[in-house]
Image: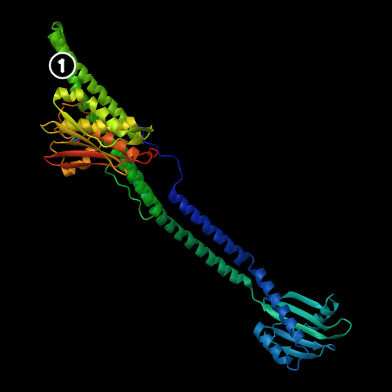
Amino acid sequence: MHTERPVRTGGKSLRLHIWLYFTIFVVIVFALLWIFQIVFLEKFYDRMKTADIRRVAAEMLDHYDDAEFRDRYDELAFDNDLCIEVVDRYYRSVYSRDLLGGTCLLHGYKNSVYDLIDEIRSSYNGIICGEVKNARTQTTILVYGQRIGTPENPQGYLLLNTPLVPVGSTVSIIKRQLIIISCALIFIGLLLSLYLSGRLAKPIADITHSAERLAKGDYTVTFDGGAYQELQQLAATLTYAGEEISRVDMLQRDLIANVSHDLRTPLTMLKAYAEMIRDLSGDNPPKRNEHLAVIIEETDRLALMVNDILDLSKLESGGLQLNPTTFDVRGKLSEIIDRYHGISKRMGYEIHFTPDEPRDVTCDAGKIEQVICNLINNAVNYTGADKQVFVTQTNTPEGVRIAVRDTGDGIEEEKIKLIFDKYYRSENHKREVVGTGLGLSIVKAILKLHNYSFGVDSVLGEGSTFWFVIHQEPTSSPKKH
Ligand code: ADP
């Protein structure tokens, strides 16, 4: 059946999507960086500075009563970039350190120490903390003040100043950097996704192309999966599928060729004899009966052939169930060979049977009978001029070995592998005994279904022995091949 080539669906492009996802990723990274570096930077900085100044003030209070408090205060001032002024309860300077060159509110020309102390005194918890902008220097100063001692009995006041670096310029630098980095990332993402999707999409496109060729019947095609494991697996599976399709296709062609070849001969004969009866022997009863006998024989041959073809296709499709029964092999063999008496007498063949002790086996009797008949048919067909065929039964501990020997030309070593193949026929087959060309394929299929061992021993010029062993253990369930 020929079906239409599948149309291209409106699916999404792999290439575009890889790039899209990469770009979304870059945008998210960019947005996060933007939020943290630009929007919150100033707040982070202020909060950090306030926390630092509080920590320093706490430490200064701890060391206020130490003898060497000045050394410690110096250290704190240097480490934290601070201006410090400590006064006692009478506002007399106890300690003073100016690291900002008079730009602070404590030491500059616009000294606000007293104002700040007033603010501390009026605050509810004795602490002030805030930013003061210096309009002249365009700087902002973080001011911190704290009372030493209790409100009723203050011992002095602690005043700290530290400059707040303008974050604005830093932010604008980071902003520009971020824009450059984002552009670079999007560009790199584009290149990377192009490269990646190329590596992914190209093998897929190649596989599609190969599959199209396969669909058109080019079985020589192989699939290449590129560098990635999953695609390699897909390619390997498709190559395997291609091989299988090719095999099935070949079998089908062979089947048609063989069947038509085999059917043609009996059909020609049928037509020829029917015409002979019509034109010549119609009024001559003895001649007519002779011709009718040929027609009947050829019709039997045809019926057998069609049965064989059906049997084999049933066996091979795996849809056939075995129907095991228990029977005596020896009895069965004698019964089959008896049936050959008619034909062997008529055509001068001799079938010798060498039996062993009766032995019960369990298997599909009908099918095993078919195997034996096929082997005897072949032996009769291919045996030598002496027309001798030998059937031997040998009981062994494993089971019963049945061998069918002829005295024919034998089979060449390389052909032995082929003769069990479907539709393999040697060119020089004779037509004395009904044969369809499928006999050994059916034998093989049945024996394989039973899991029995089988084989051929053949010596060129001396004859062949086809054998198989009916194993003693119960027949295993049929396997699908
Ligand atoms: P057919 O006998 O109808 O050709 P088979 O499948 O039974 O088909 O056999 C396939 C081929 O195996 C035969 O064509 C023949 O060449 C070879 N063969 C089978 N049995 C014998 C035998 N006993 N001696 C020699 N060749 C044989």
In this orientation, which residue lies closer to the viewer: 107 or 309?
309
Disc 1 designates what residue?
272
Direction bottom: furthest residue: 67
In this orientation, which residue lies closer to the viewer: 106 or 159?
159
Whole-percent x, y for residue 375 in the image: 23, 33
In this orientation, which residue lies closer to the viewer: 297 or 310?
297
Rendered-image quarter of ligand 1: top left
Colour theme: rainbow
Whole-percent x, y for residue 415 in the image: 18, 41
Above or below, comparing residue 323 to residue 282 in the picture: below
Q: Is residue 264 visible?
A: no
Q: Is residue 55 visible?
A: yes
Left or right of 112 on screen, residue 211:
left
Quarter-of-image position of residue 259 = top left
Whole-percent x, y for residue 237 in the image: 36, 46
Direction front: furthest residue: 357
Q: Quadrant of the C terminus?
A: top left
Quarter-of-image position of residue 388 = top left
Task: Name the secondary structure under disc 1.
Answer: helix
Q: Quadrant of the N terminus?
A: top left
Amino acid at the residue labelled 1:
Ala
Whole-percent x, y for residue 183 in the image: 49, 61
Number of marks: 1
Q: Residue at x 43, y 51 (%)?
A: 15
Pointer 1: residues within 10 angstroms few (<14), some, or many (20+)?
some
Q: Residue at x 64, y 76 (%)?
A: 165
